[in-house]
Amino acid sequence: MTDQPLTDAEQDDLRCLAGMIIPASTKYDVPGADDPIIYADIVSSLGHEGGSVRTALATLRSLADGPFAGLDQSRRTEVAAKLRADGGVPLGVLTRIVILCYYRDERVMLSLGLEPRAPFPKGHVVEQGDWSLLDAVRVRKPFWRRP
Amino acid sequence: MNEKVDVLIIGSGASGAAVAWSLAETKMRILCLEQGEWMKQSDYPSNGRDYEARVFSDYATSPNIRKRPSDYPINDDNSPIKVVNFNAVGGSTVMYTAHYPRLHPSDFRVRTLDGVADDWPIDYATLEPFFAENDRMTGVSGLAGDPAYPSHEPPMPPLPLGKTGAKIGKTMNQLGWHWWPSDSAIATTEYDGRAPCINLGHCTPACAQGAKASTDITYWPHAIRAGVELRTNCRVRQILTGPDGMATGVVYYDVNGTEQFQPAEVVIMACNGVGTPRLLLNSTSARFPNGLANSSGLLGKNLMFHPWAHVSGYVDEPMDGHRGPPLCLWSQEFYETDPNRGFVRGFNFQFNRTMGIGTEAMNAEANGLLPWGEAHHDTFRAMVGHRMSVGICTEDLPEEHNRVTLDPVLKDRHGIPAPRIDYTISENTNRMLDFAIERGREILAAANARQVHSVRPVVYGGWHLLGTARMGNDPERSVVNSWGRSHDVKNLFIVDGSIFVTSGGVNPTCTIQALALYIADAMKQRLATLFD
């Protein structure tokens, strides 16, 4: 598979699959991975791995005997389960891109109590922790092996 | 025609930088050729929201995925462990986690103690002053008093324990097993112009804060101020030799792709355990038809990786998650040989904090722990920030069939034959992995972790490239002598991880750099008789 842009049919299938992997949740008030902003991020993030994603989508289409997005809900669930079992490395690439784009979305990060920002320059705080725990090891005699 | 230099160093990474800095005081004319370029901290992934995704593109650990112009391809299809590296000023110290243990005294006497492999021609005591000098130049954080090691005092205080370290410490105390804050090449205070760590949590693919000790910001500024020239974007194709069998210089491609000859009195290889044998095997001539410095036939053989495994699970207590350097603690409880375990030698537990939220979700998915559909949310939210991880670094013994050769087809962008890796994990190491994973599971059970799972081996875990130009006193059984000089070519030295005789069971960078300083010192002591 080449790194050519996805066709409309491939995009329909990818968006549908992304929404099945991570659907929207009213419980947590978060969008699904098929949300327009997240999905646009997914498509623009395929980069040099577009070929692998297209391979996974071709497998999906083959399992579906046609357009995956056009199937009814129960058949989609059945086909997606088969894909998950047999999709191999190309599916791993697809799910990784979906997941990484999803979990950098501002709405999703905020819902998890995280600041939607790059690590640098603000960094993070890590507490020192209880160093007295090390007392149990400090009393141990040296045990490195002397040649 | 380039002017002749006294010393030509090939490679500017961990060892090349150290040897350049140490030799600079001789006031010899020293030149380093580096195939990569200077990196900019402002370009590093943790400056952006896409920092996790860049680990799969321009900051991938594998050169075969990353494909920067500075990279060369590696055929590692015939190896369960893939080579990972970085090619730039600073080499793979730009892209490492900065775990910085020393080899132990017993690692230098494997044949004597355990009847396998070979002893080194030097010992821990020989390297001890150079470990200390390297700790000072690198800026190491840690805590004196570890009963697993001879006494030493890192120049900076250790990284914080945090929630993760405290949980692991409690668990290890419950088991009565050793643990200690890791020596880390990460500044915890202002140090030599470097800012202290601010817990970005994304150390491996380069540190935007500059707290992690990569040699572009440790040794190189000092070496350059002392007069060493560092020429970037220069890829060496071949070392040439004269009628007397001595190296005369190197042929390289400059930044414009133009072929150049650089004459030199002394050539020092610092290209790592894959790059060094590759270049020497490519340096054939009528006098050296099997590659330079290969009269023993051992050049490229005895490749050692340190096969890695991970055991992870999820605990009730909140952990540090993505906050803080991944590095935290080590355990040397099972480092030394115990014949009752069914294998010789041992391993090091490396306890890490965990990763960014996207990477955590991705790994949970890859391990089959995350459902698709509505249940994804509940499941992942119970996991995030609760993972406890045990890394396992096993000693890899030298075996000649594990090797670097030249690929007959694959070439880099300059047409230079690429390296090919043939490697299998030994039976001894497999038994060690079995044992270590079981102990890792015991740790997680003691921590009341759920969803415990393991990965073995870590496929993209070939960080440590060792043993392919081993040192020794016998020219028939080694490539360089006890102070890094080629047995065959008396003005050719090797200072990188390829000269390791055995691998130990810990990350090697600290020992690689101490070795480079030791060899530089040996050269300085012998300047008048260097080629005798």
Image (cartoon, coloured by chain):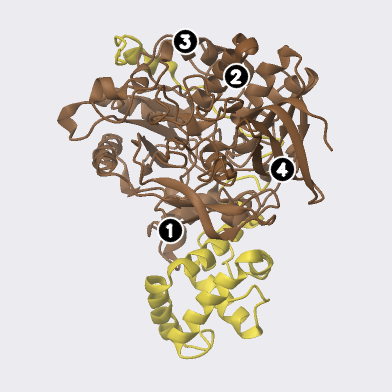
Pointer 3 or 2: first along the chain:
3
The residue pinned by badge 4 equals: B251
Mark 2 and mark 4: Cα distance apart in space: 22 Å
Q: What residue is shown at x 54% (from left), y 49% (from top)?
A: B357
Mark 4 and mark 3: Cα distance apart in space: 43 Å
Write down the chain letter for disc 1. Answer: B
* For the residues bearing labels 3 and 2, Cβ distance under 8 angstroms: no
Pointer 2 or 1: first along the chain:
1
Mark 3 and mark 2: Cα distance apart in space: 35 Å
Residue B531, image x, y percentages: 60, 19
> Quick one: quadrant of the C terminus of chain A?
top left
Chain A drawn colour = yellow
Residue closest to the far bottom: A65
Which chain is tinted brown? B
The residue pinned by badge 3 equals: B152
Q: Secondary structure at mark 4?
A: strand
B57 sits to left or right of B438: right
Q: Can you tell which mark lies on residue B418?
A: none
> Can residue A25 be spotted in the picture?
no
Write down the chain letter for disc 3. Answer: B
Disc 4 packing (10 Å; few <14; some 14–19; many ≥20): some
